[in-house]
Image (cartoon, rainbow, N blue to C red):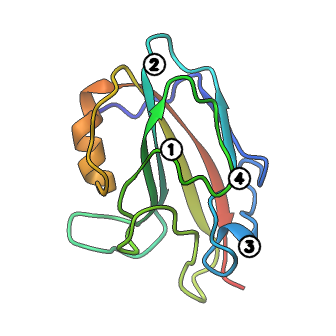
């Protein structure tokens, strides 16, 4: 899978690109996913997948880097946004060991971490089982990704 960015634009009403993620969207707050919206999906998009990943986190397991906070897939091509706290679609496994969103919670004293919300446009509608890890999802959709872009937010423990 190539990681060249496409013309899609991903934004959030909760934080600006490069800005601080509000506490309500973190493990120190209500721990609800932020609202996200997008535009400019490539022609031929049939579905979307979304991943939130913190590459600044210490290694979790051999072969992995960073920390996965959210894996969401089965999002139809007609969607252009996700509301705050979305529970629709298919939830994958995060590195907290549970499905759904788990907000930022970097180790104390680590300083700011960067949280990459990746939106992937797919040219298929794969029927995927719930609970896939980020790596399992990427392996299964590799040949279907036709566009991607990201929104990066930061967070530091108070």
The answer to the question of whether label 4 and label 3 lie on touching residues, with beta carbons closer than 8 A, is no
The answer to the question of whether label 1 and label 3 lie on touching residues, with beta carbons closer than 8 A, is no
Question: Label 4 to label 1, Cα distance in Å?
Answer: 14 Å
Q: Which residue lies furthest to the front in this view?
A: 88
Question: Label 2 to label 4, Cα distance in Å?
Answer: 27 Å
What residue is shown with label 4?
18
Judge depth for marks 4 and 1 and give the one in front: 1
Q: Is residue 42 above or below residue 75?
A: above
As drawn, the label of residue 118 is 1
Label 1: which secondary element:
strand
As drawn, the label of residue 23 is 3
As drawn, the label of residue 79 is none
Near-viewer residue (93 or 1): 93
Residue 87, x across and y down, in percent: 54, 54
Judge depth for marks 4 and 3 and give the one in front: 3
Q: Which residue is drawn at 31% across and 57% down?
A: 131
Question: Label 1 to label 3, Cα distance in Å?
Answer: 20 Å
Q: Which residue lies furthest to the top in this view?
A: 43
Judge depth for marks 1 and 2 and give the one in front: 2
Instruction: Determine whether, in the image, residue 21 is placed left or right of residue 133.
Output: right
Label located before the other in sequence (4 or 3): 4
Q: In this view, does 139 lie above or below 46?
A: below
Label 4: which secondary element:
loop
Instruction: Determine whether, in the image, residue 90 is placed left or right of residue 23.
Output: left
Question: Label 2 to label 3, Cα distance in Å?
Answer: 33 Å
Q: What is the crowding at mark 1: few (fewer than 14 residues within 10 Å), some, or many (at least 20)?
A: some
């Amino acid at each position: 899978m190539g990681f060249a960015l496409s013309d899609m634009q991903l934004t959030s009403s909760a934080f600006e690109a490069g800005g601080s993620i509000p506490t309500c969207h973190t493990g120190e707050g209500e721990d609800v996913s932020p609202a996200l919206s997008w535009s400019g999906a490539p022609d031929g998009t049939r579905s979307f997948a979304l991943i939130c990943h913190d590459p600044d986190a210490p290694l979790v397991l051999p072969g992995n880097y960073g920390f996965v906070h959210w894996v969401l897939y089965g999002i139809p091509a007609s969607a252009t946004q996700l509301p705050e706290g979305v529970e629709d679609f298919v939830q994958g496994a995060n590195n907290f060991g549970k499905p759904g969103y788990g907000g930022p919670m970097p180790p104390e004293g680590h300083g700011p971490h960067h949280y990459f919300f990746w939106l992937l446009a797919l040219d298929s509608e794969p029927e995927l089982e719930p609970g896939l890890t980020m790596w399992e999802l990427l392996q299964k959709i590799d040949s279907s990704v036709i566009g991607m872009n990201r929104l990066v937010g930061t967070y530091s423990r108070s």
